Amino acid sequence: MALRRNKRGAIVTGGASGIGAAIVQCLRRDGYEVCIVDMRAPAAVKGDVREARTAKRALKWLAAKGAPVGVLVNCAGISLGGPLPRLVQSDWDATIGVDLTAAYVFIRETAPVMAAAGGGRIVNVSSTLALRARRGTAAYSAAKAGLIGLTRGAARDLGRDGINVNAVAPGLVETNLTRDIPPETKKKLADETALGRIAQPEDVAEVVAFLCSPASRHITGETIRVDGGQLA
């Protein structure tokens, strides 16, 4: 299936900064009308990504632009809490809600619209912490691992509707979320990679752009690590 990218729209949750903002730039370059869904500017739609009404508003925004949704990128994410003995349930609930439940909500709302328009692409932004957790990441790792399972299940459920569903699993990326990591820790993590460096947001965004392109038409249910060979 070839997407007519100049005729289609894209929704990117968490698209106001970091990896999400880089994904927005790549999709706009590739001809998509992009609806940024975020709690911060420059979001086209501001709202709680856990709520169906936020997804519906994003779909209406694209419809008003004459660009039916052809791409959904679930990039919104938070990481709250700490080691399990001190992890309070409100932090657990918030992390699972934003990082996992929101993806389910947006897929559920957008998939029928995509199918009616001839298909599309869905990409979930997971993490290598879904594959190898670290101390204090229990909630985040659980949510990101859930995204990989959701990706596989959705790929099975939506494939006959012409919708490809994949995930990317970045390692450490230079964003506002990682700016407070001590330099010595960043160096250690960089040294763990085969390439010897930490990723930039664009490194992840270009892989997402590929998964949203016609070139990926026979790829679905996959999770691509973008970690510089950290888990190789």
Image (cartoon, rainbow, N blue to C red):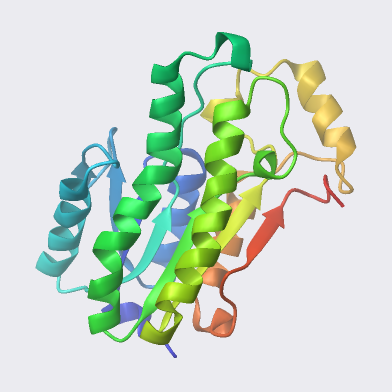
- Image-quadrant location for residue 28: bottom left
Report the quarter where the N terminus lies: bottom left
State the image coordinates of residue 106 (x, y, percent, origin top left). Answer: 31, 55
* Number of numbered callouts drawn: 0
Q: Where is 213 relative to 13, above or below? A: below
Point 49% across, 72% down: residue: 155
- The answer to whether one can see residue 212 in this image is no
Q: Is residue 66 above or below residue 130?
A: below
Q: Position of residue 225 (x, y in %)?
A: 70, 55
Q: Is residue 92 above or below residue 86?
A: below
Q: Nearer the viewer, residue 35 or 165?
A: 165
Residue most toward the top?
A: 86
Left or right of residue 231, residue 13 in this image: left
Q: Position of residue 41 (x, y in %)?
A: 27, 35
The answer to whether any part of residue 182 appears in the image is yes
Residue at the limit of the structure toward the bottom, as seen here: 1
Residue occupying the point 62% across, 67% down: 222
In-image side of 212 versus 41 (left or right): right
With 175 as the anchor, is 11 left or right in this view? left
Identify the residue at image location x=29%, y=42%.
Answer: 49
How far across and down, in percent of the image, does residue 224 sit?
67, 61
At 30% from the left and 52% from the top, the residue drawn is 105
Quarter of image, res 24: bottom left
Q: Is residue 14 left or right of residue 166?
A: left
With respect to residue 53, does 79 lie above or below?
above
